Amino acid sequence: MWNYLYLLPVFLALWAAAGIWIVFAIAVANGSVDLGKGFPFISKCGSYAPQSCIFGQVLNIGAALAIWICIVRYHQLRDWRVKTWQNQLILWTGLLCALGTSIVGNFQETNQKATHLVGAFLAFILGNLYFWLQFFLSWWMKGLPQPGPRWIRCLRQSICILSTILIVAMIVLYSRRMRSASAACEWAVAMLLFVLFGFFAVDFSTLRGCTLQLEPRLDSSLPPPPDTESPKTQTSQVL
């Protein structure tokens, strides 16, 4: 069977990165943002029509892909015998990151600033935490499989560290009204998170695919189904 799951992280990384830079280009072209006044935040570029429609669509599709990736990763870690509470903690952190991404895309800063900031917190802070939890899990469980070359793990750790530093710098610079520098940190963090999601392609390369299995709920009020006998048994009874 052809493995398609590794394409999900790659597509998410390319889709999200290309999408927000296209929004940036449209905002600059139509004058919604003025680079002469400073480098804009991502949300500033996506606050005005027509790019706000593209911005929302990009982030909503990106959030849906992130949810899919988090669920596949959850089942992969479960098959690797990761403890349930650890696995669920990682899963819910990733799902809340995806939720925050969708909130950022649908609640623009110019319309719902408080809601927008909550979404940004979930997307950036919990998004970064999601990958730190992945790293700590690989460090805690010595026998946890590590697909791909060994340098992948070191690169992931380096990106997590850099992302954390940039998030702190973004907050500090914003509090000191250094908006352009803070915005540059925000863009850098977003790109790094996309790269970290893209690295799941290495982990998913070991999977053949995934299936959906439905388990019907048993109703005690219904009579049990009749026993079905195999054709071989029925033939022996007739003979």
Image (cartoon, helix red, strand yellow):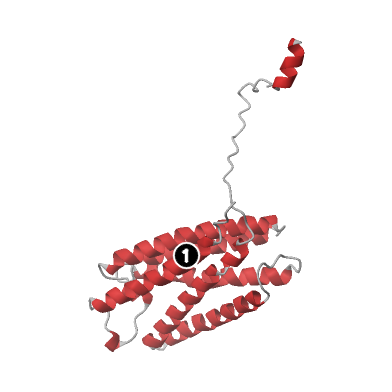
Residue 107 visible in the current orientation: no
The front one of 119 and 239 is: 239
Q: Which residue reaches farthest left?
A: 30
Q: What is the quadrant of residue 229 in the picture?
A: top right
Judge from the rendering whether residue 141 lies leftward or rightward of residue 56; answer left or right.
right
Residue 40 place in picture, x, y as percent: 34, 81
Judge from the rendering whether residue 217 lies leftward or rightward of residue 144; answer left or right.
left
Q: Which residue reaches farthest top?
A: 239
Does residue 84 lie above or below 29 as drawn? above
Q: What is the quadrant of residue 101 in the picture?
A: bottom left
The amino acid type, in three-letter code, at marker 1 is: Leu
Please state the total of marks drawn on the protein image.
1
Residue 115 place in picture, x, y as percent: 39, 66
Judge from the rendering whether residue 129 lies leftward or rightward of residue 44; answer left or right.
right
Q: Secondary structure at mark 1?
A: helix
Q: What is the quadrant of residue 134 in the picture?
A: bottom right
What residue appears at the point 46 percent right and 58 percent down from the top-left corner? 64
What residue appears at the point 59 percent right and 42 percent down from the top-left corner? 213
Q: Which quarter of the figure is the C terminus placed in?
A: top right
Residue 83 place in picture, x, y as percent: 70, 59
Residue 104 place in picture, x, y as percent: 39, 67
Give the residue number, with chain letter if any, for mark 1: 12
Q: Residues within 10 Å of mark 1 (few under 14, many from 20)?
A: many
What residue appears at the point 65 percent right and 69 percent down from the top-left corner? 148
